[in-house]
Structures are given as structure tokens and as C-alpha cells.
Amino acid sequence: MKDKEEYQGLVIKSYCGYFLVHCNEVIYRCRVRGTIDTKEVLVGDYVKFSITENDEGIIKGIVSRVSSLKKPPVANINQVILVFSADEPLLDLAEIDKFLLIIQQEQVPIVICINKIDLASPQFEEIKGNLNFYDKMGIPVLYASTAEKKGIEELSSKLAGHISIFMGPSGVGKTSLLNIIKNDLCLKVSKVSEKIKRGKHTTRFVELIMIAPDTWVVDSPGFSFYSHKLDPAHLALFYPDFQEYLENCKFADCFHVQEPRCGIKAAVAEGEIAQFRYANYCKILQSLVELERNKYR
Ligand code: GDP
Ligand code: ZN
């Protein structure tokens, strides 16, 4: 490699002040020098860098960042795979809505994956009917079982060409799904600089894993998503199906629960808003209000 030539690559890992940057099937270990600070560069950033004699890279700047998450700290995620289980724990639609609300704040396309369909009970079959609703909202719903290796190909095809992150409650099978996808599809990245192979670092860091060309998933074990805040007064704004009825509320600060002349309650009564969506709204509102209350105790 020629000195001083400029390259562009994707930051796939950061640890102890180093960044691993993927560029043309090679991973370079880079440092940050010059006008930008180490703290500014995130996993998922596209950066420009030059390579020194000993195959190390110097990051000169961030080329593009469309978006970034705070927890985990990653840039340019352009798809969220929201994982739930058919059973153990039993699928809870309010739980889906809660995650959707938080993710919709980030404006990232979402795919719902219902795992553990091998455990599907009659109780799940009853709930399942309501999942069509998300499809209609433009959120595809997939079914999978890591135990029976079902739905894995369909999930993989959704991942193609994206930088995706798996989210969802604990125990639903995120790690299991990720492991199957990693083992089945993970491409061996052709070259890795000698220095990197020698380095020993724990897996507690956020990392992008390549599972096909231009296809990455975030490997970020065990972070909590619930630390994100949501103001109860803004909750209804995250229900796309509520929007056209909000203007019918008499009070501008209506919570759509006990208030008279509420456009949302009227739409539910008319069957224009699905009953279960409103029920979920009330359940989440209640939990948000309780969170607020506990803050002042
Ligand atoms: P995570 O907390 O979301 O990462 O969930 P894990 O991947 O750790 O899985 C939680 C438990 O569910 C483990 O005991 C898995 O063996 C089990 N599990 C994962 N996928 C399936 C599945 O498709 N079917 C069944 N029956 N169990 C599963
Ligand atoms: Zn209202």
C-alpha cells in the first residue's frame, strides 16, 4: 500500500483508542489524528483514512453519518430487527408497541421477527391475528425458530444490504438468532493486519459483523433499551393510526383517557382505531406516568 493515499472505509469496531476499519475486504487498525477527536468517531461511521508503512491507518475525518444511536453508540443503522417470541415469554403486543415507540423516534425502518414459533400455543394463535396490523403499517412480520432452524433464510434476506441491529426483550432469542446467522453466513473477511490478530480484546464492545457483502449486523450483547425516555404527553404522537383523530380532541393536552370529547376515544368506539392498539396505548401511558411519579419519590 502506498503511503499518504486516501482510503474510505467503515468503522466496524472501536477499542482502547483504536478503530478497526473495513475497506475493500481488508480490515485496518487505525488511530485518529489531527482535527477530529477519538470520541467523535463511532462504530458504523464511514471514514477517510491513510495508511502508514506498518499497515496502520490514520483516520482523517468522517465521510458520512446519516444517523446515530446513543445506546448502543452506533452510526448509520438503517434497519432494526425487533425480536419477540411466540411463547416463553408469551407474545405481548403492548410490548411490541413500546419498542416501536422508542424506535420510531429514530426514524429507522423496522422488521418484526417472532421467534420460537415451535412453541406456538393456542393462546399465541389468538394473538397472532392482530400481527397483520403491523404488516399493514408497513412493518413486515417474520416468523422464525432457532430450535427448528425455520425462517432463517427469510430473515437473512431482509438483512441484505443493510446495517441492522437486533432489539427486543431479553429471553426471546436474539443471541440465538444472531449466532445462527453468524455461523451460517458470516463471510471470512480476507485479510486482517497481523497486529490485530495479536491483540486480545473482550467482546464487550459494540461491533459490526459482516454476514454478506454490504451486509452488517451489530453485535452488542445485553444493552438495555428501556433507558430511553418518552414523555407521556407525546405518547399518542407515536401512534400513526391515531394521527388523523387527534384534532378532534377538545383539549390540546388530552391524554385520551378520562377527558370528555376525545377524538381518539370516539374513533375507538367507531372501530376506526383498533381496540387493542388503544388498550396498549393506555397500558403504556400508565407505565410512563408511574415512571414519572417514582422519579419524585
Ligand atoms: P436473548 O436474551 O434475546 O438473547 O435470548 P437467547 O438467545 O439467550 O435465548 C433465550 C432462551 O430461549 C435460550 O434458552 C434459548 O435456548 C431459547 N430459544 C432461543 N430460540 C428458541 C427457539 O426458536 N425455540 C425455543 N424453543 N427456544 C429458543
Ligand atoms: Zn383525546
Image (cartoon, rainbow, N blue to C red):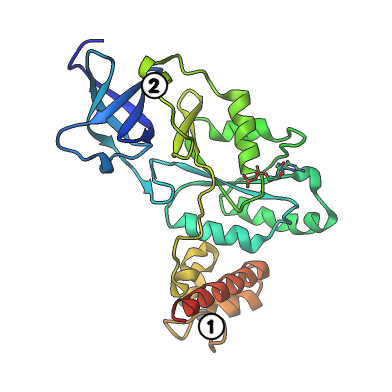
Question: SS for tag 2?
Answer: helix
Compared with 278, 76 (above or below) is above
Residue 261 on image: x %, y % = 53, 87
Label 2 vs 1, first from the N-terminus: 2
Identity of the amino acid at label 1? Answer: Cys
Tell me which residue sits at (63%, 75%) in the image: 268
- Quarter of the image for residue 201 reads top left
Compared with 293, 92 (above or below) is above
Q: In 3D space, how far apart are the residues under numbered discs 2 and 1 (Cα atoms)?
A: 61 Å
Q: Could you tell me which quadrant the N terminus lies in?
A: top left
Residue 41 on image: x %, y % = 29, 39
Q: Residue furthest right?
A: 122
Q: Residue furthest bottom?
A: 260
Residue 156 on image: x %, y % = 60, 31
* Mark 2, residue position: 196
Q: Nearer the viewer, mark 2 or mark 1?
A: 2
Of residue 139 and residue 220, the one placed in the foreground of this image is 220
Question: SS for tag 1?
Answer: loop
**Is residue 277 in view?**
yes
Tell me which residue sits at (22%, 17%) in the image: 52
Of residue 199 and residue 9, the one placed in the foreground of this image is 199
Tell me which residue sits at (80%, 54%) in the image: 125
* Mark 1, residue position: 262
